[in-house]
Image (cartoon, rainbow, N blue to C red):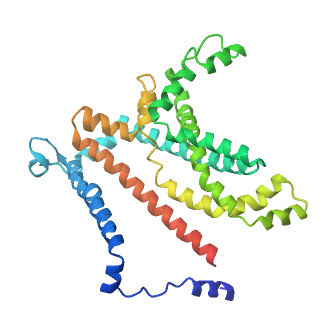
Amino acid sequence: MTSAAKRRRKENVAEPAPKITWKEIKRQKVLLFWAAVIVIYGIIFYYLPLGGWVMAFQDYKPKDGLFHSAFVGWDNFKFLFSDATFLKVIRNTLAMGIINLVSTFVMAIVFAILLNEVKSKGGKKVVQTISYLPHFLSWIIVTGILHDVLSGTGIINEILMGLNILDQPLNFFAHPKFFWPIVAFANVWKETGWNAIIYLSAITAIDPSLYEAASMDGAGRWAKIKHVTLPGIKPTIMILLLMNVGNVLNAGFEVQYLLGNGLVQSVSETIDIYVLKWGISQGNYALGTAAGIFKSFVSIILIVIANQIAKKHGEERLF
């Protein structure tokens, strides 16, 4: 370990926490009050409902309740993993989660870099404002727009037929092979502008003298992006990527539910839709709870792995 690394490590050692006194408590009473409200809210609405997980290990009947329903152990989980439909649901959720993560993540970075290269401040503000407006639209509106655009009389079919690529209108929502790209496009269109905001903030924090030095060395725009902008926002990229890894199984519910139909059900159904179908529509609360627990368990594992990678990345930067 170099002397500079040792010195940085010593500087990063946390100072001892100040002693808590009644005088300090009185001074911070407003903050403590609202902190207590948030803690109580979390306990009531986030932790107490976890008691319902016991349904996954029971043959739960609403009339019997949690305390009198028959205990069946791991039977519900065994049924899940022997059900071909649930295995397809896992595949669909993982596939759409990864596709959405990669597409929205990459497009947000690309959009932020391209927007940063716009010289006109007024034009940049207009483009940025327009780009993140779709974030505030509900999925009902977004899927309605997609249905209109991709319908038989929509603009996409008109363009394709005008270019003689198609002889007759194509029903995009009747072909399973188009469903995942449509979902990915919907997420990119809705969230790219909003996700790019944090990258734009990271870019503005880069020292302008680095760009000046690159210009003096004869670097063009692409060279500046490659050697100054991307390295400058690399920590932000890594942090957001690791944070989003835990949400891979949150592939979505609204867009798949609203765009899905019987013709594409084999590729549109996610774990959330499976839970809705079994837990609410068919009244099998135990099976729906088991599916939800599986999703939570996998998400926790991914978050722990991402956290370990983040710690390792931090140590490599330190030493």
Q: Which is more toward the observer, 203 or 90?
A: 203
Task: Please give left or right for residue 160 compared with residue 58 in the image.
Answer: right
Quadrant housing the N terminus:
bottom right
In the rendered image, residue 36, in percent from the top left (x then y), is placed at 29, 67
In the image, what residue occupies the spot 49% across and 65% down? 307
- Answer yes or no: is residue 83 visible: no
Residue 23 visible: yes
Q: Is residue 214 left or right of residue 14?
A: right
How many numbered circles are shown? 0
Residue lying at 25% horizontally and 36% vertically, measured from the top left:
280
* Residue closest to the eye, 313 or 109: 109
**Which residue lies most toward the top here?**
167
Q: Position of residue 255 (x, y in %)?
A: 46, 34
Q: Is residue 163 above or below residue 55?
A: above
For the C terminus, the image quarter is: bottom right
Residue 253 image-quadrant placement: top left
Location of residue 300 with respect to 277 vertically, above or below: below
Q: Nearer the viewer, residue 293 or 104?
A: 104
Q: Is residue 277 left or right of residue 176?
A: left
The location of residue 248, given as percent across then percent down, is 48, 49
- Going 64% across and 45% down the picture, which residue do you hit? 128
289 horizontally vs 180: left or right: left
User: Residue 115, position in %: x, y?
Assistant: 71, 47
